[in-house]
Amino acid sequence: MVTIAACATTSPATLEMPVNQFANEDRSLRGVEVSRKLTVGLCCLWLVAVGGLPANPQTNASSTLGPITIGEGVLRANAESVIMPEYPAASREKHTTGVVVVQLEVTENGLVEATEILQAPDQMIKRAVEAAISQWKFRPTVLANRKRRVRGKLTFYFERVGSHFEVHNPVGY
């Protein structure tokens, strides 16, 4: 429970509400003092969180915040440097085809820090995707004037087209 001091033009009042209920209305309640104007009819209220919250919103460095999960379309749109995976010769010789799904984490500066192959048809294709993805670079993601880490998934299709083997992005990318 967090106490919210409500000050109107006539007289101050005190309201109490669960922090998660108010946080749903104003996400900035978590970790910072909140000043919010609510208009009810002709009356304007300014809400200020009182107690239990740090006075300085800068105390949370962006490195202590967890990564933001983004969709594949957003992740691909933010890619500045893209290296497509090569189809390994040994996989081509075995006629190996399939889908690769890789989850990656990107630093505040747009560099790939970690990859995890969630699905791959063989180890050689898995290594080819890891090698390619580690070279990708992204535009930094900025949220609330802070660069943020992001996490997302990419999909690649290793396919045989006629007598050729090709690596494709999902349709639309």
Image: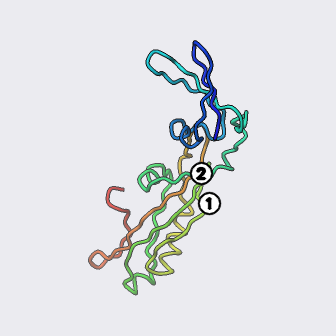
Does residue 107 lie above or below 91 as drawn?
above
Earlier residue among tags 2 and 1: 1
Displayed quadrant of residue 12: top right
Q: Residue 113, which numbered label?
A: 1
Secondary structure beneath dot 1 equals strand
Does residue 145 lie above or below 87 as drawn?
above
The residue under the point 58% across, 55% down is 106
Q: Amino acid at mark 2?
A: Arg
Q: Would residue 28 appear left or right of 42 to someone viewing this image?
A: right
The residue under the point 66% across, 45% down is 62
Viewer-proximal residue among 62 and 34: 34
Which is in the foreground here, disc 2 or disc 1? 2
Label 1 neighbour load within 10 Å: few <14, some 14-19, many 20+: few
Displayed quadrant of residue 57: top right
Most extreme residue toward the left, as rendered?
162
Viewer-proximal residue among 96 and 38: 38
Does residue 113 lie above or below 144 as drawn?
below
Contact between labelled residues 1 and 2, with CB atoms less than 8 Å apart: yes
Q: CA distance from mark 2 to mark 1?
A: 10 Å
Quadrant containing the N terminus is: top right
Residue 149, image x and y in percent?
59, 51
The residue under the point 37% across, 78% down is 97
Q: Would residue 23 appear left or right of 65 to someone viewing this image?
A: left
Q: Amino acid at mark 1?
A: Glu
Most extreme residue toward the bottom, as rendered?
94
The residue under the point 60% across, 37% down is 29
Residue 133, image x and y in percent?
52, 63
Viewer-proximal residue among 60 and 148: 60
Q: Residue 149, which numbered label?
A: 2
